[in-house]
Amino acid sequence: MTSPLPAPTEDLLHLLHALPQPVAVFDAADGSVIAANDHFCNVLKLTKEERTRILRNAFGGDASCPLRLRILDESIAHFFAPSGIRSLIDTHIKTLRLGGRECRLVMAAAVNWPGTPEQKEIETGRYRALLENLNEIIYVDDEKANVAYVSPNIFRLTGYEAHEVIGKSFMDFVHPDDLVGRMDTFLKILGGEEQATEYRMRTKAGEFKWVRTNTRPIMRDGALVGIQGALVDITDFKEAEEALKLSEEKYRIVVQNSKDAIFVTQDHKLKFMNPRASAILGDTCENVADRPFLDFVHPDDQEMVADRYRRRLDGESLPDGLAFRMLDRAGRVKDVELNSVLIAWEGRPAALSFLRDVTIQKKMESQLRNAQKMEALGTLSGGIAHNFNNLLMGIHGNVSLAMVDILPSTIPYKYLEKIVSLVRSGSKLTRQLLQYARDGAREMSTVDINQLVKDACETLGATKKQIQIRFKLSKEVPRIKADQGQIEQVLLNLLLNAADAMPDGGDLFIETACLNGGRAEGKVTLSRSMDYVMVKFSDSGTGIPGNIIDRIFEPFFTTKGLGRGTGLGLSTVYGIVKNHDGDICVESQVGGGSTFWVYLPAGAADNVCPAEAPPARVLPCQGNILFVDDEPHVLHSVAALLMHSGFTVFQAISGSDAMEIFRKQRKHIDLVLLDLILPGMSGKDLYYRLKEISPQVKVLISSGCAQDGQAAELIANGCLGFIQKPYDIEALSTRIMEIFSAG
């Protein structure tokens, strides 16, 4: 233990107090104060008691030293006083000997300004304001990580006053998750390295803020005595950085998972593309990097795409969208739609493009347009058939009237019979049109499709022996619910179509199967929740040219030439299949044959065929009939035939005429023969108005169109049946008398 230092001479004390600077003398061995002038005490803001004890100690009193010194470097001193820790920055420290002992002479240079006390106070305030208004927080730690000094602006960051931080370990203010990294950095600084680091710092309120610090070691006489650095708040920067990362991540997720291709072109070359673009081009970004985008555009569309790109770069205002064709690496053609915007890419003009593969959509649109066209043609065909049937009805009625007064053995009678035969042929033609229009009446029964295929092939084989028919008929195919006669017509028409495609003979493969709508072959639209029976016809014929394949189901379209075909075969097939809630499609290649797929809903195996109708009875014709038809040639001729058969007939050419007659004669009218299609008041509306007048009225409906949903509704609501135009008078008379005899 060192001996006490002798008290300083009175001259030394007077000298210290006479100096205008804050000056003190400390023992170099233990850092205790020997003497200090008033300026020094004022700078450290010592209490009156602390000053008295320092003065008594200077004159050799017994009081313990109230102030001790610890030097961190030549410019920073750390003082320990009973009232708290004090630090001075910008100090000058000199070593001297006093009474044979080594001492430290400390002068606070920061307040060593000439002038009056008021001027000194002003300068001191400026110095303090400078520290407090710095963005950086200045701090000094000793070699044990204890805070030796921190500038007053620490308050703005943490809420702590400087004296609340000084003397504590800086580790007390570090986020637990950052503590290990901060200790590693501290050890590197103690090893002589300068370090810059970022970490989270705890505030007085318990929150954490991000800070960045640049720190260097403090060396004294070759030994490390602490560290010093500057600390700055980067919380806003970190929050912005995190927000940017989140934003970038969101955009990355969107771009990487977009169903549209996203890519950047610069100088006509691909610079970036997302996975969807890779899928459309059929290659990776690495393999197509710096390749011209036009390499992937269909040759016929390249000039259009290049011209548009040049015009966009020149600043010309153009529509955003562009449709063209592309070729992937395998050479497959794809329909695409492109939207582009101009951007800067690495400081140079470029185009950011969004491309969508619409190949499937285009095909579906084409199928939809074709379906709409076929629907329109069906409506047109139904109208033609209706009008044509009315004409045939008028011809048939007038011819039948003429035949009444002519002997069957005469030549005129034979000519009239020929006309009747032609009317029947015309009626078959209109029935085909009505089938195409999906307007044909169906007599549903349980049908074995495999047996129908075999029967139809026997018919074809008898006349087309040069055709080799090969079967692949599945035993798992269930019976279907269908109109057997119409399905037979479908099969025969398709067989004849295949035979016409192979005039010199060939092979015809017929396959049947039952499958779900989602597994159907060919370009058809079927329900995935239903099973279907498939009949597949594949021939080795001449094939169908691509420019006409979309028209083969149109009515009256034929390639057989004048007099060789009506053009109604395949259109009838189309109408029947659609009328059965099925679908049909074709694929063909010129010189490679054609394949037709027919799909019909699979029905329950226990469907029962309807019972056969009993043979018609010949009944005497009598009774009163109200006949309503808007076609005069039909109205008058049929009325005359009915009257000739023995009926009394009231004639009405419109709904209003019918209402007037019925109100006057309803007690005498036994039956109303009602045409469904009337101008003004429809046959349906007329029926319900007649029912209002007389709920027991008997009505038989007829039409040039086939029986449809409207007829079915009226039959369900009391109508006694439907008869298709053109009909002969014998069939009509028989039907009427059956109604009368049934009561």
Image (spheres, rainbow, N blue to C red):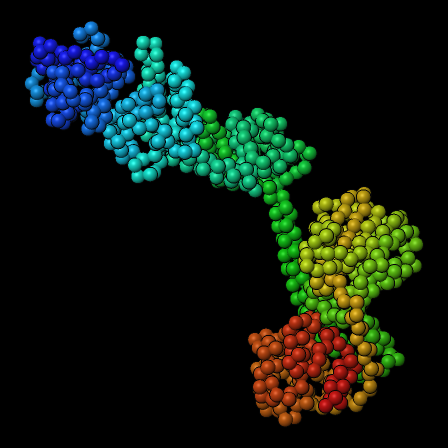
- x, y percentage for residue 233? 32, 30
Residue at image point 78% right, 80% down: 731
| Towards the viewer: 555 or 326 | 326
Residue at image point 56% right, 42% down: 259
Q: In screen coordinates, is 677 left or right of 454?
A: left
- x, y percentage for residue 21? 13, 15
Q: Is residue 671 above or below residue 372?
A: below
Q: In screen coordinates, is 482 left or right of 675?
A: right
- Quadrant of res 135: top left
| Towards the viewer: 623 or 510 | 510
Residue at image point 86% right, 53% down: 472
- x, y percentage for residue 520? 73, 53
| Towards the viewer: 133 or 405 | 133
Q: In screen coordinates, is 216 left or right of 458?
A: left
Q: In this view, does 497 lie above or below 676?
A: above
Q: Is residue 17 above or below residue 415?
A: above
In this rendering, the count of numbered labels is 0
Residue at image point 19% right, 17% down: 33
Determine if residue 689 is in view: yes
Quadrant of the image containing the C terminus: bottom right
Quadrant of the image containing the N terminus: top left
Q: Is residue 678 above or below residue 65?
A: below
Determine if residue 311 is in view: no
- x, y percentage for residue 538? 82, 50
Q: In screen coordinates, is 7 left or right of 156?
A: left
